[in-house]
Amino acid sequence: MAKRVQNPPPPKISKREMRRRFNNGGYWEQLKTGGLNEKRIRQSPNVRFPELRSVYPNIHSVTARWRDQNGKDIVEVHYYAQCFDGQIIPNKRPDPKLLFEDGVMYHQKPPMSAQIKKLMNMARDKAKRWMRRLKNPRRHWGLVVS
């Protein structure tokens, strides 16, 4: 049977590098001038920052994809918008999460806390497997315990 060809994992770049590419590419300016169109993916009134909610009571968390004139996804961003007009909160900028540049879709690296959590879960699961093996060695290693 032929082995399936797997695509390489998408390149992950730091939050700082993602923002640098986003700003240098002028994507927000392109959106403002009509060069890109917005397609909202998610919109939620659940905002976990009380200081923003106190100033903007109708605030929404928005995840959107910005597409070129051919409908091709260029950037995925997250931002906070005022519900009544959909405008981005003043003095705030969209936070890019995905960026299609030079034929490559770049993903933002998860924060270090998420990486540590993932490693902790992997270690916990491995420890659980070893404990099961120690409880029943005959089943796992074919050993006879007297």
Image: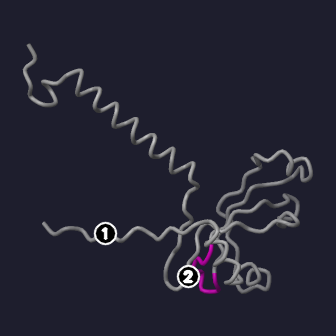
Which badge, 2 or 1, comes first in the chain's sequence? 1
- Taking the view exactly as shown, the residue that stands out farthest to the right is 55
Tell me if residue 63 comes above or below residue 101 in the rendering: above
Over which residues does the magenta segment extend?
A: 68-75
Of the 4 image quadrants, the one containing the N terminus is bottom left
Front one among 143 and 80:
143
For residue 11, side relative to residue 47 (left or right): left
For residue 6, side relative to residue 84 (left or right): left
Membership of 39 in magenta stretch: no
Q: Mark 1 Cα within 10 Å, few/some/many (few <14, many 20+)?
A: few
Q: Mark 2 Cα within 10 Å, few/some/many (few <14, many 20+)?
A: few
Q: Quadrant of residue 98?
A: bottom right
- Identity of the residue drawn at 57% across and 48% down: 113
Front one among 31 and 95:
95
Residue 49: x %, y % from top left: 79, 47
Residue 132: x %, y % from top left: 27, 26
Q: Secondary structure at mark 1?
A: loop
- Identity of the residue drawn at 19% across and 68% down: 3
Q: Amino acid at mark 2?
A: Glu
Q: Give the residue pinned by disc 1.
A: 6
Of the 4 image quadrants, the one containing the C terminus is top left
- Identity of the residue drawn at 23% across and 28% down: 133
**Labelled disc at residue 52:** none
Residue 47: x %, y % from top left: 77, 48
Q: Give the residue pinned by disc 2.
A: 101
Residue 92: x %, y % from top left: 82, 65
Q: Secondary structure at mark 2?
A: strand
Q: Quadrant of residue 83?
A: bottom right
Q: Amino acid at mark 1?
A: Gln
Q: Main secondary structure of the magenta part?
A: loop
Q: How many marks?
A: 2
Tell me if residue 82 comes above or below residue 53 in the rendering: below
